[in-house]
Structures are given as C-alpha cells and as structure tokens.
C-alpha cells in the first residue's frame, strides 16, 4: 500500500473520529438544554438542583474545554507525526548508540514525559478556572504540583517496564501479539490488586470506618446482605474537590468500598446505606472479574490489530522512520485508539447491565426511596445534567441516566411492596 494513502487514512480516521464525538457533544448540549427547560420543575423538586441553568452552564464549559483540549491534542499529534518532528525524535533516539530495546524504552519514557507536560496547562485551567468558578475546587497550587509530579513518576514506573517487556516480545517472539495480550490482561489483574493498596494512598487518605453512626449504618447494610467486612473506607476527597462519589475497587484481600467524605457529609444515613448496598452488589455479583473478562476480549482485538499494523512497511514510510518496533507500536496505538472509542457501546452495554443489577440489589436491601434520594443527591452535588442525548448516551454512558435509575428503583420498590402485600393476603400467611 502506498505510504501517502496510509498517511491520509490515519488523518481521516483520527479527524473523523474526533469530529464524530464533537457532533455528539453538540447534540448532547442542545438536548440537555431543551429537556431541562421542559423538565425544570422535576429537576428542581426531585433532584434538588435549585439553579438548573448553572448545571447547564457547567456542562457547556466542561464540554467546551474538553473539546478544545482534544482538538488541540489532535492537531499537535498530526503536526508532530507528519511534519518530520516525529522522525527527528526517532533519529535522535537511534543516534544514542544503544540497542533497539533500550531505544524503545527511552522513546516511551520521553513520550510519557511529553504527554504530562502537554496536559499540565489544560489540567490547570480545568482545576483552577472551571472547577474554581463553579465552586468545586478545594485544591491548592502546591497540592496540584505535588499530585502532578507523583502522577508522572507513577506513570513512568508503570509504563516503562510494561513497554520494555512488550518491545522485547516483539523482537524475540514470533507470536508476540499473544504475549502482549497476556501481558495486558496480567497487568489489569495486577493493577486491580495494587492500585487500592499502593497507588491510591499516594494521593488520598483512606480511613477505615470503625465507629459511630456511620459504622452502625455500614454494619446494618452488610448484616442485611449476609456479609461481613472491614474493607469500607472514607476518603478525604474534600481536600481537592467538593464533588461527591463512591466506588468499589479491587478483589480478594485488596477489595474495598470507598466513600468520599463529601458524600458521607451530604447524605442521610439511609442514602449512604443505599450507596453501600449498590457497591456491595458489584462485590456480590463478581462484576470486577466480569470487567476483566471484557478487557481481555478488547485487548485481544487491540493486539490482533497491532500485529498487522506493526508489520506494515507503508506505515513507517508514511511517518518517515525506519521499521522499528517502538515506532510501529506508537503509531499503531494512535490508529487503534479511535477503534476503541467507536466500539465503546459494546462495553457500555455490559456495564449498564451490571449497574442495573447493583441498583436492584440496593432496592432489595435498603429500599427504592433511599436509593432514589442518593441518586438525586449525587446529581445535585456534582451539578450533573441528567438528560443525555440518546446517541451521546450510547457512546459515553456506562451508567444508566439518573432519571431512568430513579424511575426504575421506585418501580422495583413498588413491585416488592405489591409482592409482600400479596403474600400477606394469601390464606395461612398469618400462621
């Protein structure tokens, strides 16, 4: 294949994908504005968002800044790739007089550092302008700098060894895509174990919930579910932001449920219990392992594509470099990135199913109104706009929209009440 055709194909794929998602952004903003205007009374009364226009403004600004960041990044990538700067960087590394493997390690490390430097100004704007204007930022510049430095070091410590093993496999193993797939799956499993114990504590403090009303509420939920655990933590999220959330992470001895301190402070005990029950369902239903399985399938597709791309001479001719493994992988990942974005509905389909299972379990353990209240509080606390455009939802949402979730948990609650009432009316029910 002609190198010019390959170069044009890369440009069309990257620009076309970005344009598609920008169109989705615009459609979503318009849909949110129209639907919020129609449902304003519901947004105020049910979600507790006193000023829906502020939520819409927050969504517009975040979307605009995100789109600007994405397009500027794309222009920079294409400029570097096809202006000769990428080839110059490869030539510079090639001139070090070291092995191809070491060249690749240096190239990857340089790429990680360049990405961090490029991202820093955007992160500053998002944190100290956007989040500050809308009242979410609690972070100092010193803390932001500290997080940036630590995050860069962690990225290097994770990325460089993985890249070294993968590059060695490309040079030494005939079926290197299979080895790469095994490496990626192993990393996902290992990272799931290591992250909550070693990485997360570098950025936040996690305090075990051991006493008081919150501990009693935690124990009550786990007793109803027939579980017992001490792996429930409160995280000092308020040190950086007033956003609230909760999440489940890890498996085996490393599994834990994490509640933001902002969530604990802003919710009623029953609402906190519903959040806990939802996260417990992910534990109970083995969703972490299911996500690992989905990731394994996705990685199989990615490495199959990389196996073809890395062996294509026209790819190297298109970017003006020798046929070197680390170049092929770098450009190959650029090409595969849009593929993963465009196929995100497949993964979202399963995630949505898991989230619905977790909501249903929360209703079973705590009740629908508590879960509805928790969802409303989270939406209000985070100034979220609750009515995504259907196409935007398909590509971006791994949780059902809040109105759907509230409606469904109430329906499940009503069905449970009806079943209990029917059981009580049956002959012999009082015996």
Image (cartoon, grey):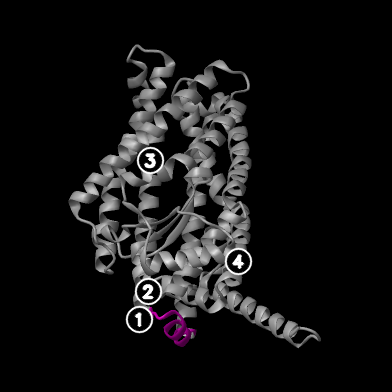
Q: Which residues are magenta?
A: 39-52
Q: Is residue 375 above or below residue 24?
A: below
- Identify residue for label 1: 51
- Identify residue for label 3: 198
Q: Earlier in the sequence, mark 3 or mark 4?
A: 3
- Residue 125 in the image: x percent, y percent? 26, 56
Q: Earlier in the sequence, mark 4 or mark 2?
A: 2
Q: Is residue 84 above or below residue 419?
A: above
Q: Quadrant of residue 211?
A: bottom left
At mark 3, the secondary structure is helix
Residue at the extreme right: 427
At mark 4, the secondary structure is helix
Q: Earlier in the sequence, mark 2 or mark 3?
A: 2
Mark 3 or mark 1, whichever is nearer to me? 3
Q: Residues within 10 Å of mark 2 (few under 14, many from 20)?
A: many
Q: Residue at x 48, y 33 (%)?
A: 331
- Residue 160 in the image: x percent, y percent? 40, 29
Q: Residue at x 55, y 72 (%)?
A: 366
Q: Residue at x 38, y 59 (%)?
A: 210
Residue at the extreme front: 431
Q: Earlier in the sequence, mark 3 or mark 1?
A: 1
């Amino acid at each position: 294949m002609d190198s010019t055709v390959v170069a044009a194909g890369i440009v069309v794929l990257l620009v076309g994908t970005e344009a598609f998602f920008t169109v989705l952004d615009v459609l979503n903003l318009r849909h949110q504005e129209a639907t919020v205007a129609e449902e304003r009374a519901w947004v105020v009364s049910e979600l507790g968002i006193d000023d829906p226009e502020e939520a819409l403004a927050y969504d517009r600004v975040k979307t605009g800044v995100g789109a600007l960041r994405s397009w500027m990044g794309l222009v920079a990538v294409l400029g570097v790739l096809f202006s000769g700067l990428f080839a110059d960087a490869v030539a510079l590394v090639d001139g070090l007089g070291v092995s191809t493997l070491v060249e690749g390690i240096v190239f990857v490390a340089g790429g990680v550092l360049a990405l961090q430097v490029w991202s820093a100004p955007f992160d500053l704007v998002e944190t100290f302008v956007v989040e500050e204007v809308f009242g979410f930022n609690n972070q100092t510049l010193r803390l932001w700098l500290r997080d940036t430095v630590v995050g860069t070091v962690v990225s290097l410590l994770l990325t460089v060894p993985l890249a070294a093993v993968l590059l060695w496999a490309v040079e030494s193993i005939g079926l290197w895509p299979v080895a790469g797939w095994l490496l990626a799956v192993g990393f996902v499993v290992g990272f799931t174990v290591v992250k909550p114990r070693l990485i997360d504590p570098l950025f936040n403090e996690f305090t075990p919930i051991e006493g008081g009303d919150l501990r009693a509420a935690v124990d009550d939920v786990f007793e109803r579910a027939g579980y017992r655990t001490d792996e429930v933590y409160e995280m000092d999220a308020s040190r950086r932001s007033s956003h609230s959330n909760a999440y489940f992470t890890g498996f085996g001895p490393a599994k834990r449920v994490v509640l933001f301190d902002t969530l604990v402070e802003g919710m009623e005990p029953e609402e906190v219990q519903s959040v806990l029950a939802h996260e417990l369902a992910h534990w109970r239903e083995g969703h972490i392992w299911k996500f690992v399985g989905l990731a394994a399938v996705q990685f199989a597709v990615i490495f199959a594509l990389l196996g073809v791309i890395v062996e294509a001479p026209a790819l190297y001719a298109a970017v003006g470099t020798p046929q070197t493994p680390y170049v092929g992988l770098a450009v190959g990942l650029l090409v595969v990135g849009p593929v993963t974005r465009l196929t995100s509905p497949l993964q979202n389909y399963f995630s949505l199913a898991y989230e619905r299972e977790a909501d249903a379990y929360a209703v079973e353990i705590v009740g629908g109104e508590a879960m509805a209240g928790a969802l409303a509080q989270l939406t209000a606390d985070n100034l979220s706009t609750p009515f995504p455009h259907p196409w935007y939802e398909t590509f971006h949402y791994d949780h059902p929209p809040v109105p759907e979730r509230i409606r469904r948990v109430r329906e499940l609650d009503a069905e449970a009440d009806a079943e209990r009432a029917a059981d009580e009316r049956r002959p012999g029910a009082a015996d």
